[in-house]
Image: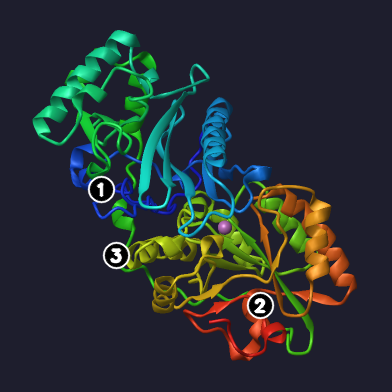
Amino acid sequence: MHRFRFAGGIALIAASAVGCGMATASRTPDLTVRAEPTMIKFVDPAQVDGLITRTVTRRDAGDRYVHIAFPDVRTAPALTKKLEQEARRRLDDFVTSTKPDSPEPRPELNMDWQLTAATHGVTGVRLRTGEFHGANWTNSRRTLWYDHTTDQAFGSTGLLDGESALQTLAGVVQRKLQERKLDVDISAVVADPDVFDSMAFNPRGELVVEFDDYQVGPGSLGRVAVAVPPLQTEALLSEAGRRARTAVLAARPVPSKTLPVKPPRTPAARSSAAGDVDCAKAKCIALTFDDGPGPATGELLDVLAESKARATFFTVGSSAAAAPELLRRMSEEGHLVGNHSWAHHDLSKLSNSKIADSLGRTQQTISAATGQTPTLARPPYGAWSKDLALTSQDMGMALVNWDIDTLDRNGGDPKAVAELAIKGARPGAIVLMHDSSRTSVAATPIILERLTAEGYTFVTVPELYGSAGMTPGRLYSSGPKVIGKRPLT
Ligand code: NI
């Protein structure tokens, strides 16, 4: 059962139906989310005990641009299993339909999540999937539910009392869409569980039915959604549906006013353990861990602590928001927490405003958890653009890529991963690893032992540059000892 663990938590905005990095390269804004009734009520994931973000990869995914995240809900294993099945289905479809080494702009698959309910009785998770195939993003949504009293996970139509209820609801939704005079194809609004696969509740307890892009109309409509009032759904909800609605209404609202318009100023991030090593003289190397925090991050922190090694963590904002205690631990134990965007989209495809939104929300999440403002960002996929450089400059962050890739992202043999780091090691190197990957975590003790024996000190990235420091907006791939004093761009 869930326990609230953070009184303050990290505020998420209820309006994040449009935010959370649900990037769209389309020029058409997501109009419907501004309409109050279709705004779904979301729960702050930091308030749910035992919740951590998981990612899925495939060994043969190669260098495809894929980031798939979903919550591992410890108290609802059947739900976690169903979420993972959905994540793997999307990944398999994408790998089958794309080629590695695709030309720019690369095809991309991105899945992130939000909680539509999290109480002792009911948990709901909304998965948002974006696919990019050369022109625009196509976004889809799917909401899965879990009833703790029956220990069952089900799709959105499980909220309804059978086939006839779905038929009736389809009729209601058709009429509501017709009233709005949108360019919607009403004949596509059929009583099919695949069409009605994303349903949740708004703060008034109205049932919000939402469709995927292109599902019931042209892509220019973006997210099409309708809210059906309780009077019209009263006879349609199943027992589980009623419990879900009760859970949503009873949940503490996400206090949007605690998300300050101007976040309090926190000092620039620096390692609490740095300052005793001069990398101009010592053999320094910087291990960097991306895409977390995840289920193996705590174990990795234990491993690093045992060897008194410092590292830099480039965290994904939406995952960090669910596990702020891990970020706090990183910071307290002398590691540096950097920004790896909100939901791991390729930022080089995005406009200035979307880049600023993705990095800015992550900055807020990290500084709320650690009390320090990140000064480093790593572009997802290492993909750089001029807009990204300018935006990160404005936000006071240097961009950090790597010069040793341990190829750990899609799993594999920890020994092979460790070998790549050890063979490539040289003073000033920046090593790419992933704390989202158990392989990487298993490889770390081997790397620490071997390179310590070779006289290396494990430092955070800025320590490589010493008093010269790092310049916001510039892209770095290795320390000055390796490439001289000149940054790459
Ligand atoms: Ni990454």
Among numbered discs 3 and 2, the one appearing first in the sequence: 3
Q: Element under label 3?
A: loop
Among numbered discs 1 and 3, the one appearing first in the sequence: 1
User: Which of the pair 410/47 is nearer the observer?
Assistant: 410
- Mark 1: few, some, or many residues within 10 Å (few <14, many ≥20)? some
Check disc 3 and report the residue beneath it: 261
* Distance of label 3 from label 2 (alpha carbons): 36 Å
- The numbered dot on residue 478 is 2
Question: Is 397 drawn above or below residue 170 in the view shown?
Answer: below
Q: Element under label 2?
A: loop
- Mark 2: few, some, or many residues within 10 Å (few <14, many ≥20)? many
Label 2 CB sits under 8 Å from any ligand 1 atom: no
Label 3 CB sits under 8 Å from any ligand 1 atom: no
Among numbered discs 1 and 2, the one appearing first in the sequence: 1
* Distance of label 1 from label 3 (alpha carbons): 22 Å
From the top left corner, tell me how far across and down residue 387 is, in percent: 39, 72
Three-letter amino acid code of the residue under disc 1? Asp
| Mark nearer the viewer, 3 or 2 | 2
* Distance of label 1 from label 2 (alpha carbons): 40 Å
| Residue that appears at 45% across and 57% down | 342
Question: Is 133 drawn above or below residue 175 in the view shown?
Answer: below
